Amino acid sequence: MNPQRKGWLDWLSERLVLTEIFSLLVSYGFFHAELDSSKPPREALAEAMARPMPSYSAWPRVLGLAAVVLIGVEIFTGGLLTFYYSPTPEGAHASAATILSEVHFGGFVHQVHYWGAQLLLAILALRVLRFFLQRVYRAPRELVWVFASLLLLVAFHAELTGRILPWTGTAYWSGVRALEVVQTIPLYGGLVSFLSGTEGAVISELTLLRFYIFHVVLLPIAMLTLIYLHFSSIRRVGLDPSKVRASASDDGVTFRQHVVNLAILLTVLVAALVTLGVLAPRGLPAGAEPYATLPGVHPPWYLLAPFGFFEITASWLPRWLAGLVLLAATTAFVLVPFWARSLERRGGRLLLMVLAGVAVAVWLALTLYGTKVA
Amino acid sequence: MGVRSPSPGRLVWLLLLAPGAAAADEACVLCHPAERVLAAESIHASEGVGCTGCHGGDPASRDVAAAHRGGFQSLADRTGVPKSCAACHADLEQMRPYNLPVDQYAMYQTSQHGLSVAGGDERAAVCTDCHGVHDIRAPDHPRSPANPANLGATCGRCHGDRSLMERYGHDHELVERYESSVHGRAVAAGNVAAPTCVNCHGVHGATPPGVGDVGKVCGTCHVQARVAFLAGPHGTGLAAANLPECESCHSNHAIHPLDDADLGSLCAECHEGDSEAVQVGLKVRALIGAASEELDRAELLTLEAEKVPLDVEDHLARLGEARTYVTEAQTIVHAVSVEPVEEVTRRARSIGQEIQHELYSELDRTNAHIGLAIFWFYVLMTLVILFGYRRRLGRASGRR
C-alpha cells in the first residue's frame, strides 16, 4: 500500500481514537476482534476483516446479534416517539392518538416500535431455550446463562412499562392485572410498589411518569449493560460446549463475510418489522377510565401463567406463599447453572430434560388457565 | 350588677330547642318533644314558623290548660287541614317573598281530593298526606314525599292500597303499572324531566283527565307527535268514533314505547290484514328500519375508524344529526302518511351513506399495501445482491 496516499480512514484516525470506537462495535457483537492500534488504520482494518470468525457467531447463529439490532431499532423508534408523547394521564392517550393519526410516519414508527418489542421478546426467549438445549450453562458458561436470563426478565419489564404508556383502557387494565401479580412477590413486589408509586395495584399519575422514566431511561441502560456483560462473557468462553475457550470458526468464514451476513440480517429484520407494521397495525383503543373496570382484559402473555397460578391456589395457599413460589421459580430459572450440573451428575441428562419438560408443560397449562379466568 | 344566671329548667329546654332557634320560646316542646324534633327539620322551622303558626295557643305558658287556650286547634280533624295551610299559603302578601303560587287551595278545592274532603270524607287526601305532617320539606328536597322521585310512592300510599281503593271502586294497580312504564322507569333512573303522576293528573287540582282530554295531556310533552296525529286520518277518525287518541295504541299508565318493528302488526289490530292501511304501516316501518340500519352500519364503521385512530368527531356529529331525523320520523309516523316519513328518513339515510363512503376511503389500506409491495421489491433486490456478494467472498476464501 502506498504510504503517501491517505484515505478518509487515515484522515479520521488523525483526529479520533478509532480503536476506541471500534471496540464499542466489538462490545456489541458487530465485529469480533480489536483493531491493532500500532498499525495504520487501513492496514489494521484490512487485517481484521480477513481474520477468521469465532465459531460462536458464525452464520446462522444470529439471534444475539438480531437482539442487539432490535434493541437499536427500539431505541431509535422510541426516541422518535418521545418527541410527541406526553406522560400525563390527561395527555397520554391524546398524544398517542396524535402520533398515530397526525404526525407524519408517526403511525409507522409506532407500529415498528410495537412489533420490534414483540420480536425482541421472542428472540430473547428463543435464545434462552437454545442455551438450555445446548447446555450453555455448564462451567465456564454460567454467566452467559445468568446474563441472558436476566436480559429476558428485564425485557419483560420494558414491555410492561411500555404497554401502559398509551393509556388506553386495555393497556391500563392489563397493567393493573400485571401489577396485581407482581405485587404478591415478597420483597420484589414491595420494591416495585415503592419505586412506581403504586399502592394496591392502583396506577396513579405518579406511576405513569415513573413507568415512563423506567421505560425510556433506566431499563434501556440495564439492557445495554446486560447485553454488554453477556457478550463479554461469550467472547471469553465462546458458545461451543465441547470447548472451554472461544475458538475460531471451522468453516473459515472471515469478518468480511460476517459483515455481509450482518447486512443480510439487518435487511431481513427491517423487512419483517415493516411488513408486520403494515399488515397487522396495532390500533389505539379508547382511553383509560380508572374508575370503570374494563371486563375481559388479560395480563400480558408472559404473566398469564403466574396469574393462573394465583387463581388456582387462591383458596388454599396464602397469597404471600404463592408469591414466594413465583420468586423461587424465577430465581431457579436465573440460577440454572448452579444447580443443573449436580442434578445432571446424579440423575443424568434425562432427569433434567424431564424436569424442564414438566416445567414448560405446567407453564403452558397455567397460561391457558390464566387466559380462561382473566 | 352581676349577670343573671338562667334557671336550670330554662337551660334544659334551651338545649333541646337549640336546632330550631325559630321557636325557641315555645313551651310546647316540654310535652310534645317528638313533634318538635320532626318540625325542626321542616322548611317551616327555618322560616320561623313554629308550632303556634299552625296550631295557635299560648306558647309562653307552661300550664297545660292555659297553653291550649287562645285560638288553639289540634287539627286532629283532617278535614280542617287544608284551610289551616291556606291561611298562609293562599295569602298573596305572605307568599310573595317566596314567589310561591297562592292558587293551590283554590285548585285543591276543585280536585277529587278536595271535593271529597268538602263532602266530609276523612279518608281523602289533604295537604299533609303528600307534603308530610310536621317535617314538611320543600318539594325539591330529596326526602320530601312531593319530590318527583318520591311521588310514585306518595300517591301509591293510598292509590296502591287495595282495601281503600275498593271503597271508591278504583283500580289499585295503577301506580304499579305506571312504575313499569317508560315514564316510571325514566324517573326511577333519575330523569327529573320524566313525567310523574302529577304531570298528567294535575298537582293540587288532581283530577283524572277525561277520555277526550288524554291526548291533550300527552301533547303537553309530545307536541310534535300530537300535531302529526291530529293532521292525519287517525285524528279525525278516532274523534268521530269517540275513541281515545294516544291511549288506543299506547294504553295508559303502563305506557311502553312502541318498537318500529311493531308498526305493521299494530295496524292489523284494527285494520284488515291486507288493507291499504296496513300497507302504509309496513312501508313506514321499512323506511325507518332502512334508515336505522344505514346509521348502525355508519356507526360501526366510525367506531372502527376511531380505533385506528382517525379523527371522527365530525362523523359522530353528523351521525347524531341523522339519528335526530330518525327520531323525527318516529314522531311523524303519527300522521300515518308515507311521504313525510320518506322525506325525513331519506335525509338520515343519505347522511349514513355519506359517512360510510368517506370512512371506507379513509380506512382503505390499498396504498399502504402497494407501498409494501414496492418495499419488498427493493428488499429482495438487496438480498439478491448481498447473497451474490457473499457467495463471491466464499469462493475467494475457498481458493486461498
Image (cartoon, coloured by chain):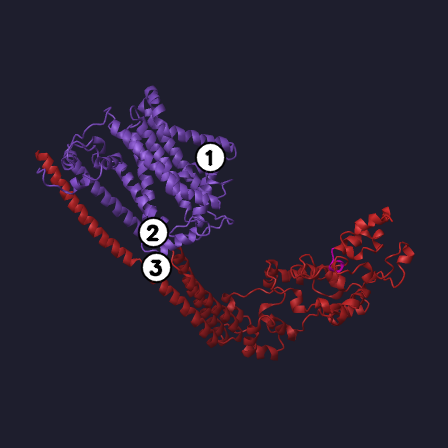
Between tags 1 and 2, which lies in front? 1
**Which secondary structure lies at badge 3?**
helix
The amino acid beneath tag 3 is Leu
Whether residue A179 is situated above or below residue B125 in the rendered picture:
above
Question: Foreground: B234 or A314?
Answer: A314
SS state under label 2: loop
Q: Main secondary structure of the magenta part?
A: helix
Where does residue B382 sit, x and y in percent of width and height? Answer: 18, 47
Check contact, mark 2 vs mark 3: CB within 8 A: no
Residue with the mark numbered 2: A281
Same subunit: marks 1 and 3: no
Chain letter for mark 2: A
On the image, numbered disc 3 is attached to which residue? B363
Mark 1 element type = helix
Residue located 75% across and 64% down the image: B127
Direction from residue B87 to residue A315 in the image, left or right: left
How dense is the environment of label 1, judged by Cα within 10 Å: few (below 14), some, or many (20 and up)? few
Amino acid of disc 1: Leu
> In the picture provided, is A35 more to the left or to the right than B302?
left
Position of residue B104 relative to residue A271, above or below, is below
Mark 1 and mark 2, same subunit?
Answer: yes
Whether residue A295 sits left or right of residue B382 in the image: it is right
Mark 1 or mark 2, earlier in chain: 1
Q: Residue at x 43, y 49 (%)?
A: A167
In which image quadrant can residue B66 be found?
bottom right
Q: Quadrant of the C terminus of chain B?
A: top left
Q: Quadrant of residue B64?
A: bottom right
Please state which of residues B322 and B156 is positioned toward the viewer in this rendering: B322
Q: Which residues are magenta?
A: B41-45
The chain identifier of the residue carrying mark 3 reads B
Q: Which residue is mark 1?
A: A191
